[in-house]
Image (tube, helix red, strand yellow):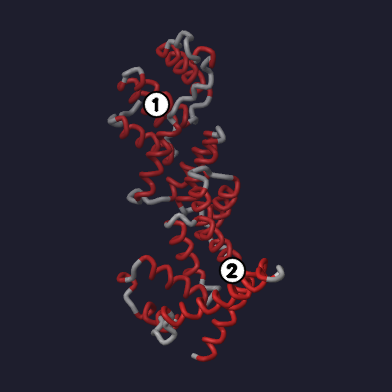
Amino acid sequence: MIIFTLVCMTIGAAAAIWLARPLLQESGAARLIGIAAGAFLALGALGAYFVNGMPDAPGAPYQPRMEALRAADPETLTPAEQEAWLRDAVRRDPRDIEARRLLGRFLAATQRELEAIAHFEQAIRVSPQARLFNDLGQTIVTLNEGVVTPEAQRAFTTAHAEDPAMPEPAFFLGAAAYEAGDRAAAAAFWGGIITRLDEDDPYREAIASRAADLLSRPSMGGADPAALTEGAERPDVEAMIDGMIARLETRLEADPADISGWLTLARARMMQDDPAGAADALARGRAALPGDPAARALISALGAAFGLEETDA
């Protein structure tokens, strides 16, 4: 207690002298005022400690608190306690991959992506597992507001190579290919993972539905930008759709294995309020790709989205 008090006095006096140093450099009355001010501040700091300080108050030692958290049912812990538990586990064993991974996921879920990324990277240095690369990639995507950056793409590529059956890397790699304008590569990634997942796997249906939606969206890159400016004559939408359908039909005659083409054709027919024509396009796509379960899954997903019954061409 006495030692602690002396330390507090020393710190307070040093702070007071530092604050009063401009006056101490003066001469005469100003110097005396500086010395008095320093003494007053030192005594004030000591008095404040005696009034408000509680050196004998019981604290919350780290080790007993952590032991209590370790002994508790994890489901009863608050989020703050869960984080403390995970940080303690990582502190006790920096090579505990599962604890570090869970901590990284917790941090990512609470919008602390940069710290989460650091933990995933440290875990990867210890054990380069596919799930760690996947978590890293997803956190980078979240940090960049949904954009699959080159860094995220590298993480997903490694995860996909390590575990081709993991759905998330294949989905994000397909999304990156789609954003780059490579629909064939996107279809290959999405179709590949669809064939690897069980038919009752919820990821299979979700990926098939999302992939079918994206791959069926027509590209309007051929539209004249000048026709879309304010005040200009609007393009004839029906004529544009007719032209797109004609181009799709020609392309599919040359390449009937183009799954994106069949899906886009079906959507174009629906844009013309022609569900029968859309169903026929999907049926022709099935007939053109009889041995491709991924393509058939995509076709079925789009047909379900449009409320169309499956038919044979």
Three-letter amino acid code of the residue under disc 2? Val
The quarter in which the C terminus is drawn is: top left
Name the residue at 58% across, 72% down: 37
* Circle 2 residues within 10 Å: few <14, some 14–19, many ≥20: few
Q: Position of residue 62 (x, y in %)?
A: 45, 80
* Circle 1 residues within 10 Å: few <14, some 14–19, many ≥20: some
Using the image as rendered, state which of residue 197 and residue 101 is in the foreground. Answer: 101
Three-letter amino acid code of the residue under disc 1? Arg
Q: Which residue is mark 1?
A: 284
Tell whether 293 sits left or right of 11.
left
Q: Is residue 66 visible?
A: no
Kindly give the residue lying farthest to the bottom in the view shown: 2
Q: Which mark is residue 221?
A: none
Tell whether 25 sits left or right of 89.
right
Kindly give the residue lying farthest to the front in the view shown: 29
Q: Which residue is mark 2?
A: 126
Name the residue at 58% across, 78% down: 39
The image quadrant of residue 69 is bottom left
The image quadrant of residue 94 is bottom right
Q: Position of residue 140 (x, y in %)?
A: 53, 51
Q: Is residue 275 visible?
A: yes
Dot placed on the residue nearer the N-terminal end, 1 or 2: 2
Name the residue at 51% across, 48% down: 141
Q: Position of residue 276 (x, y in %)?
A: 30, 21
